[in-house]
Image (cartoon, grey):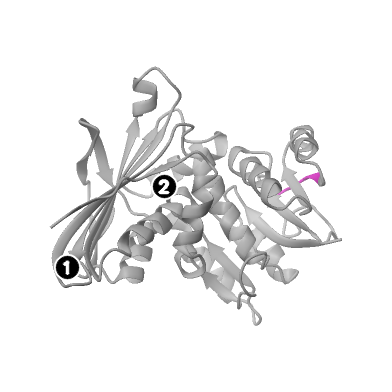
Amino acid sequence: MPKSVLFLGGSGQAGSDTAALLRRWHPDLPFTIAGRDLDRARRVADRLGHADAVTVDLTRPDLGLGERAHSAVVATVWDSHLHGLGYAQDHGLPYLSISSGLVDTAPELVAGAHRGNPTPVLIASHYLAGLAVLVTLHAARAFDRVDSIRIGAVLDELDSGGPAGLADLERWAAAGTAGLERRDGVFTWIPDSPTEIHLDGVVFAAQTVGILDVPSLALATGAPNVRFDLAVGESPGRRAGGRPSTHLRIDLSGTDPAGRPGSSTHHLTHHDGQRPLTALGVALGVERMLTLRGTALPGGPHTPEALHDPEYAIERLAGLGAGFGPAEFSR
């Protein structure tokens, strides 16, 4: 029997949704659902099947787990003491995190470098756990040269996740209000940067934010101008009397393969909000770490765009009820 995937925070929204999606893709893959509330973790494990439940203490180097065999560690909750990463390193396991954010990656990278034989560490604290980057790279394939990328994300205020997700947002906000932008090839911090997102005739008040998507997209495409704007409020889905929805507007400009200048706009939407898309981003990472797709990863840090084929992400999106497109290209 294969060893189980350890989900830290597995009874929360991101962890349970990811495990449920992976169960659909890989029915025989075992899981260990780790949480502070054992009864809640057991309920999640029972729904999944082929899973067990444990309590976890992120303040302990051994996580309070003792000697258990796992195949990977997936931190869908903030690994506040980095003991989840240390546990993975101690046991030679690949590790994935989604809650560090740009402000917390420095301690994570340093901790990962303090071992002689580093294990694979997938830093996926991007928007939608890297999915926003992947769909943008898919859209960028229409260009021979990308000059600018601007992403506008609309997140419903009722769809920011459970208690762990809210704590992440508060922690990131406490780190500062400056946004990170690549401007004329230079990564630039912009203090207090209000902006707007235009979506279906509605103008959303937004803020340019410091997020890992900016350096990932800038370095993957070579675009000298990249920014990410985020609006938190009442989503179009809720405005229409339905459930909180999530929306991503992707604007690109550059030149096509014939050398002609042009621009395009893509839209990524889901009527059930960000949860299924975040789960997809994490699930893609788990697949890759376990070599259920692709070859074994070398030790050290990795980011989603370096590991995933955007075309594969688009294929997986089709099974989630998400909308992507239509693309508008103008010259």
Q: In which quarter of the image is residue 96?
A: bottom right
Point out the image quarter for the N terminus: bottom right
Residue 237 place in picture, x, y as percent = 38, 26
Point out the image quarter for the C terminus: bottom left
In this picture, residue 223 sits left or right of residue 300: left
Q: What stretch is highlighted in magenta?
A: 52-57
Query: Is residue 79 in view from this perspective?
Result: no
- Tell me the element at label 2: helix
Magenta stretch: dominant secondary structure: strand
The amino acid marked with disc number 2 is Trp
Residue visible at 65% across and 45% down in the picture: 9
Say which residue label 1 marks.
184
How far apart in space, not on screen, are marks 1 and 2 (Cα)?
26 Å
Q: Which residue lies furthest to the bottom in this view?
A: 116
- Tell me the element at label 1: loop
Residue 272 place in picture, x, y as percent = 49, 32
Residue 161 place in picture, x, y as percent = 52, 36
Q: Which of 288 and 42 is in front in this view?
A: 288
55 magenta-colored: yes
In this picture, residue 39 sits left or right of residue 170: right
Say which residue label 2 marks.
172
**Numbered label attached to residue 215:** none
In this picture, residue 295 sits left or right of residue 28: left
| Mark 1 closeness class: few <14, some 14–19, many ≥20 residues within 10 Å | few
The amino acid marked with disc number 1 is Asp
Q: Nearer the viewer, residue 168 or 15?
A: 15
Residue visible at 70% across and 62% down in the picture: 72
Residue 46's place in the image compared with 188, above or below, is above
69 magenta-colored: no
Residue visible at 60% across and 49% down in the picture: 76
Residue 295's place in the image compared with 99, above or below, is below
